[in-house]
Each structure stands twice: as structure tokens, then as C-alpha cells.
Amino acid sequence: MTTTTRIVLASRPKGEPTPENFRTETAEIGPVDNGDVLLQTLYLSLDPYMRGRMNDAKSYADPVEIGQPMVGGTVSRVVESAHPNLAEGDIVLGYGGWQTYSIEPGKSLVGLDGFPAPLPAALGVLGMPGFTAYAGLLTIGQPKPAETVVVAAATGPVGSAVGQIAKIKGARAVGIAGGEKKVEALRELGFDAAIDHRAPDFDEQLAAATPDGIDVYFENVGGKVWEAVLARMNEFGRVPVCGLVSGYNATSLPEGPNRVPQLMGLVLQRSLTLRGFIQREFVDQLPQFRAEMGKWVADGQVKYHEDVVDGLDSAVPAFIGMLRGDNFGKVVVKVAD
């Protein structure tokens, strides 16, 4: 038996999560048998989708149960193995959640020995967020040379990859972020234009940055950004929808007039395509993604930022801050060396 320290869901949040919604505890796990593997967590990924898992509501995945560890992708070291293809010391990508040790089926793990970048990248640009950007943009958005691609939360792990992949495909990339520091980072990443959504003249800046309209909008924010973008969508525009982080902490519908008729009217008039997706739908593209994105990262065509915090006890404040937009780049918790 092994003792793990874990952060569990103590209560379901109403609105923005608070530290009281989480509880840290220790538990005994084991034994390891029947193809399972005991893992020590090295790095834990923090992602916006986790907020939805805290709700007891129907979604594309089951909610976290009260008293159970928060879910999350992990890079881990094999401590003990009952799987024929994994040995002590192997480094793997799994889904161990917010805890120091976990037991997972060996068949569900991806080996990272010989990984071509620092290990946290397996949770970011070369992991689920990077794959979300790659599959959503290229399969649904299908940017063409000289078209305009807009993405919000553009310094995040998904948004920054979307903009850079769009550039590789010959499109114009317009990034939207919060604050001058993030806007400047987008310029350094090679975006053709960068806009601060907090600016009082945001709508005017968006119009100036998209003089020929918008062909592809990669949606992961919603709210006022979506309202401004919608008005500038071109005929036959495409909108891959992978998240709506601006509303994840909402406790009621937004105030103001019902905008659904306006939305549906523009969808009809401009022949728009809005397509929600979960990256697991495109799992058959993973080998191609790993090959292409690995090359783009290696040769510097795709750059990335990581926001690494130390210690499992940093996970809760880092998660709450991420939902507020305090992070800069992919949020990763370093749990152990």
C-alpha cells in the first residue's frame, strides 16, 4: 500500500470556486495488479474544463463526485508495474488527477521516454491543449491562405497554438487577450494583430484589425468578445467552439436582451458554420498531430509559454487564478522532481 496526498472536491461551487470547495487529505492506495501501474505524479495539468466537472450537471463527461480527487492530466514516473510493457522508472502521460500518487491501467498510459521537449510540454503544446488547437482549427476552421483567423484567450495554450498554426497555413492571425503584457506577447509570437479585450474601444480595435472581416473564429471564451466577433464574420465563416470560459462561473443567464434571434439571423444570412467539439472526437489524428506539431516546436515555428507553480498545495490558488485569467500560458503544477 502507498500513501497519497490528494485534493478532493469538498463541495460544489456556486459561481467562482473558492478554497472551501476543496479539501486536502491522505489516503492509502494499492495493491498493484491486473495490468495496473503505480505512478508518482511529477507534473499536473490545470485546465478550464475542470470547472465544469465540479458541477453536478449533464455534460460530455461525468462530474467529479464529492470526496473524490479532482481530475487532471499528469506526467508521472512508474513506481511499480503489473503491466508487461511498463517498468519502474518509465515516464508516462496519464490522468492521475490532483494527487501525489495514483494507480492507473497500464493500457491507458502513453510512454514519454525520449520525449522531444521538456516534460511539461506533454500537458500543453504537445498534449491535449495543442491537439485541441490543431484538430479544431484544421478540421473545422480549415483556414485558407490570406483568410483572417481570430482567437481569444490567445496567450493560453490553445489560443497561442491556434494563431501560430494559422500563420503556418498562410492565414492572418488576430489574437485577443487581457492586458498589455499579454498583447505584447502575442506580437512576439508573430500574430499579425493583437487586441486587449479590456480596452474601452475594443470593438473599434477589432474592426481595424480585421478590415476584410473574419473568416474563422476559434471560440473558447464567449461573452462580449463573441458578440463583437459575430458582427464581423464573413459569409461562409467557420466557428470551432471548444470552450466558453467567460461563463464557467455564471450562476444565471446574462442580463440584457435575448440575442439568440440575432445569432440565428446572422448564421442564416451569412451561411456560418458553428461546430462544437471535444478533441477526443479526432483521436485518429493524434499520430499526425504529434509528428507535425513536434516538428513545428522543434524548428521554432510554434513557440509556447508555461506558467509552472511548485507543489500540489499550489493547485487550488493556481486553478482559481486561471479561471480569472491571471495565468500567462499553460498552467502546470510541479508536484515532484
Image (tube, helix red, strand yellow):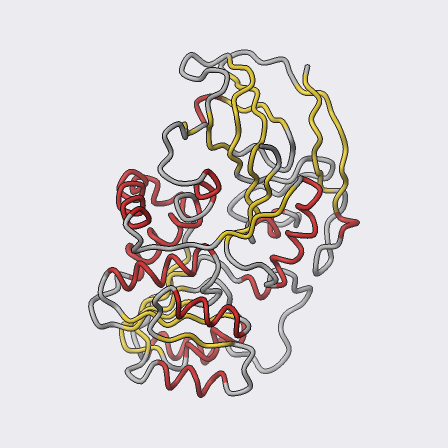
Residue visible at 58% across and 59% down in the picture: 327
Residue visible at 56% across and 18% down in the picture: 79
Q: In this view, does 159 lie to the left or right of 39?
A: left
Residue 227 or residue 331, whichever sits in front? 331
Q: Position of residue 192 (x, y in %)?
A: 33, 73
Q: Where is residue 273 in the image (x, y as percent from the top left)?
A: 33, 66
Residue 111 or residue 272, whichever sits in front? 111
Q: Where is residue 141 in the image (x, y as percent from the top left)?
A: 31, 62
Residue 141 or residue 120, whichever sits in front? 120
The total number of labels drawn is 0
Which quadrant would residue 17 be assigned to in this image?
bottom right
Q: Is residue 311 left or right of residue 177?
A: right
Q: Where is residue 13 in the image (x, y as percent from the top left)?
A: 73, 53
Image quadrant holding the N terminus, namely top right
Residue visible at 20% across and 68% down in the picture: 145
17 to 114, vertically: above or below: below
- Residue sticking out furthest to the right: 20
Image quadrant holding the C terminus, namely top right
Residue visible at 65% across and 58% down in the picture: 321
Q: Is residue 311 left or right of residue 215?
A: right
Residue 178 or residue 207, whichever sits in front? 178
253 to 12, vertically: above or below: below
119 to 3, vertically: above or below: below
